[in-house]
Amino acid sequence: MFETAKEYLRYTNWPIILAMLALIGLGIVAIDTCEDYCPKLTDRALVARQISFAAVAVAVFVVMSALLYDRLGRVSYALLAGTIVVLVGVFALPADTQGTHRWIDLKVIKIQPSEFAKLTYVIALAWYLRYRDNYRRLSGLVVPFLVTMVPMALVFLEPDLGTSLLFLPTLYFMLFMAGAKLRHLLGIVVLGAVLLLLPTPRRLKPEMPAAEQTNRRLLAYKVFKVGDNEYAVSAVPLTVIGGYQVSRIVGWLWQDNDKLAQKEAYQLQMSKTLVGCGGWTGLTQGDDTFYYLLPDLPEGHTDFIFSVIGGRWGVLGGLGMLCLYGVIFLFGLEIATKTYDPFGRLLAIGVVAMVFSQLMINISMTIGLLPVTGMTLPLVSYGGSSLVVNCAALGLLINISRRRPMLLGAHPFEHERREKELPVTRALPGSEWPEDLGHDA
């Protein structure tokens, strides 16, 4: 089950590991900057806790990279089912200070089940798709989409809009890699967009805050009255999300509105200002601009840590961080394309898609390309659950790169070449695939 330390070190993909450790270290330094410059931040033990989280996350990474990943696949359905049960169970717990149901408070530590749902979902979906080809037909996409909707809907209802947005991009990457037809996937995107934009009325109740009623009127297709009741007709998502989420969308759509910049768009404006003031090389520790801007940036150590990095180390610091992510993505895609085990390939592409989607959503919201959604920056933002899950996912990626399971039959997902049988072979870790197989080594 486990290999010797010598074998582990020899066949490990070191660029991914070094990039992962560098990003964790960058996050700790950025969190320390927040502690130094944010007098409003009452919790002064963030760095110490993040170091503890990092130690646990690295230990989980080592375990996940050493286990036989196919054994994890055999229990993937049970893992996903258990995660769904926990996601349902959080609604029975008291809401947190913001009125959400995202956390399980164990007194010693808080756990965020939605973070673990991302990884168990990827493992279960990869296991389901590994030997099937019915998703080559439109009807075969029904089950994967239904499986996706269950955890996605539960996470959305917590509410955690940011994490819920990760499921669909991950699903599309995995289906495309598995061989689903592009026209089917694009057709579903168009159909989904049409359904989401359908006009749906919502009553503006008198007990709603005046600001929320104003924001819902701004986003409505039409506002009308029936008797004493006023209704705002909006797209489906706008009728179900909470008032603070509506204010974030309003602040994003009218970013340059001076009035909204003092409230709805305040967090976004502070983030963009901090990134912009960083210039090419960033603000020095003695710079008064950084001292006055950073304390006014809400959630700078979590969701908006990219803004802290941009302000402290400038464009060059941000590009350096993106290069580290680029190492993970490039080597991750190489692992996925050179893995002939269907489960391993799908699992690898699922992990890459999950991390890539988190990165794009987080950076986009901090610079105003997307509304603020509450998405952490993988491996960098403060938080134990997010750090442990992302390290576990990268551990699986390393695991896949170190093993070449037995190949039996045709190259996976090459559906047009099923009639060509390939010889049974097994490539050991570190060895090359025979050239006569017709595959790129």
Image (cartoon, rainbow, N blue to C red):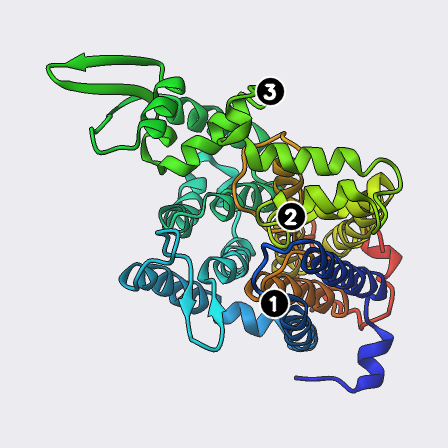
Structural distance between the alpha carbons of marks 2 and 1 = 28 Å
Q: Of helix, strand and loop, which one carries label 1?
A: helix
Front label number (3 vs 1): 3
Local packing at callout 1 (Cα closer than 10 Å; few below 14, some 14-19, many 20+) is many
Q: Please name which of the two marks, 2 or 1, marks the residue nearer to the observer.
A: 2
User: In this rendering, which labeled residue sits more in front, label 2 or label 3?
Assistant: 2
Question: Which of the pair 44/278 is nearer the observer?
Answer: 44
Q: In the rendered structure, which disc, 3 or 1, sits on the residue that comes first in sequence?
A: 3
Which residue lies under the disc numbered 3?
256
Image point (73%, 66%), residue name: 398
Quarter of the C terminus within the rendering: bottom right
- The amino acid type, in three-letter code, at marker 3 is Asp
Q: Are marks 2 and 1 in contact (CB under 8 Å)?
A: no
Q: Say which element carries label 2.
A: helix
The tag earlier along the polypeptide, 2 or 1, is 2
Q: Which residue is mark 1?
A: 388
Residue type at numbered disc 1: Val
Q: Position of residue 10 (x, y in %)?
A: 87, 76
Q: Residue 89 in the image: x percent, y percent?
A: 31, 64
Would you say 305 lies left or right of 75 here? Answer: right
Q: Are marks 3 and 1 in contact (CB under 8 Å)?
A: no
Give the amino acid type for the residue marked by disc 2 in the picture: Pro
Q: Name the disc covering residue 295, or none.
A: 2
The spot of residue 213 in percent (x, y) is 31, 25
Residue 105: x %, y % from top left: 41, 70
Q: Quadrant of residue 335?
A: bottom right
